[in-house]
Image (cartoon, grey):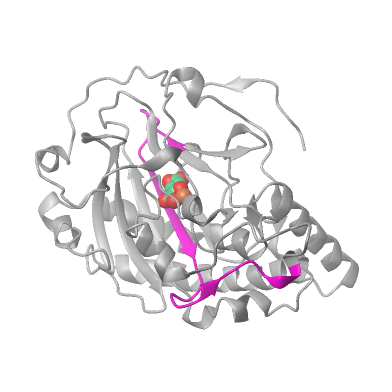
Amino acid sequence: MQTSPVLSRFSLSVQLPNFPMAGTASLLTQNFPSQPANTKSFVPTDSSPEAITAFDDEIPTIDYQLLFADDHDLRSKALAELGKICEEYGFFNLVNHGIPESVMERALKGVSDFFYLTDEEKKEYERKDSTDRIRWGLGFSPGDYQMVKREYLKVIPHPKFQRPTKPPGFGDALEDYYKRDREVILNLARAVSKTLGYEESYIEKVFNLEQGSDVSAMNVYPPWFQSTTPIGLPAHFDPGYLVSLIQNVNGGLQILHKGRWVNVHMPPNAIFINNGDHLEILTNGKYKSPMHRVILNNKVRRVSVPTVHGPSLDTFVTPAAEFVDEFHPPAYKAMIYKDTLEANDYHEVDGKSCMAQLRL
Ligand SMILES: O=C(O)CCC(=O)C(=O)O
Ligand SMILES: [Fe+2]
């Protein structure tokens, strides 16, 4: 892996102009009683320019086709590489995954268009209950609910996708992408099972993926949001076993690797994958879930579509016996997947993590 000694500084240097809050101004005067009461200890307290700098280390790449190659040697080599990356990094760019660029573009365009709807139109999806299947909302600055950093739309692609009905065609575009994304992730889970020494259906069975709970929290980070800090989404971990992410422009996502922040650069048409908390629990800490955050960029409007792929809601997630012995005692509490999400009030991506409660 090539390591750049050069710190790449985001050009914003925290001098964000006081642009008017286009499109969201009226929302800011409203009360959002269901916002999280706190953002826990993962919120970085230091958001000075130095604190948001990150390195441009190379992000590992996995060629999806090679994981399933007919050629035994090619396949074994690719699986060995996948295992090493899951253990040493916990994230990678997935290329050659077979999802047509047009499918990804259509989904991203749909998300972008959704966020251009009027506040009135979007408010139909404002949160009413923590289990709402489609939910739109604003992400705020830690500790300051006047300071908007991002807008999000959350949907549940699986087990039962309930499509947003506007703008026209958006639901279909999402459904198409989610279907293909899920296929890729299920195959990836098979490959990951093998890297752990199990038969390929291991994760599928132990997490009951037929009824697997997938959650997609689409985001837009417009450049005009007023900001005293450049953090668009505070540092956090994702639940689930694997998380997939696509975006419309490169840059903004940073991930913690070996104690330092790394800018996530994605080649065109790649899908960014990271281990989720529940893969970390299953492997008793072997395949760790990486901490990540989003830094605002005041030049571009960035849209991202992360999808958390999780066990079925009733799965009792516990470290697998194969990863526990007298030298490796269980490092995590066992808990039903739904309860871990509920303990977090379903705010999977708002700077909180179930891991704090699950680590022993
Ligand atoms: O927008 C991004 O790049 C990342 C979003 C994220 O981490 C999340 O939604 O969990
Ligand atoms: Fe995340």
Q: In this rendering, is residue 240 above or below 355?
A: below
Q: Nearer the viewer, residue 14 or 310?
A: 310
**In magenta segment, residue 302:** yes
Q: Estimate the x, y position of residue 290 in percent, counting from the top left.
A: 58, 47
Q: Nearer the viewer, residue 57 or 339?
A: 339
- Residue furthest front in the image: 326
Residue positioned 51% across, 63% down in the render = 240
**In magenta segment, residue 240:** no
State the image quarter where residue 281 is shown. Answer: bottom right
Residue positioned 70% across, 59% down in the render = 329
Q: Nearer the viewer, residue 278 or 169?
A: 278
Res. 247 in view: no
Q: In what quadrant of the picture does the C terminus appear?
A: bottom right
Is 90 situated left or right of 337 in this image?
right
Q: Estimate the x, y position of residue 288 in percent, counting from the top left.
A: 64, 52
Residue positioned 36% across, 47% down in the render = 350
Q: In what quadrant of the picture does the N terminus appear?
A: top right
Res. 199 in view: yes
Residue positioned 43% across, 23% down in the render = 46
Q: Estimate the x, y position of residue 36 in percent, counting from the top left.
A: 27, 48
Q: Estimate the x, y position of residue 50 in percent, counting from the top left.
A: 50, 18
Magenta range is 294-322
Is 61 situated left or right of 105 in this image?
right
- Residue furthest right in the image: 73
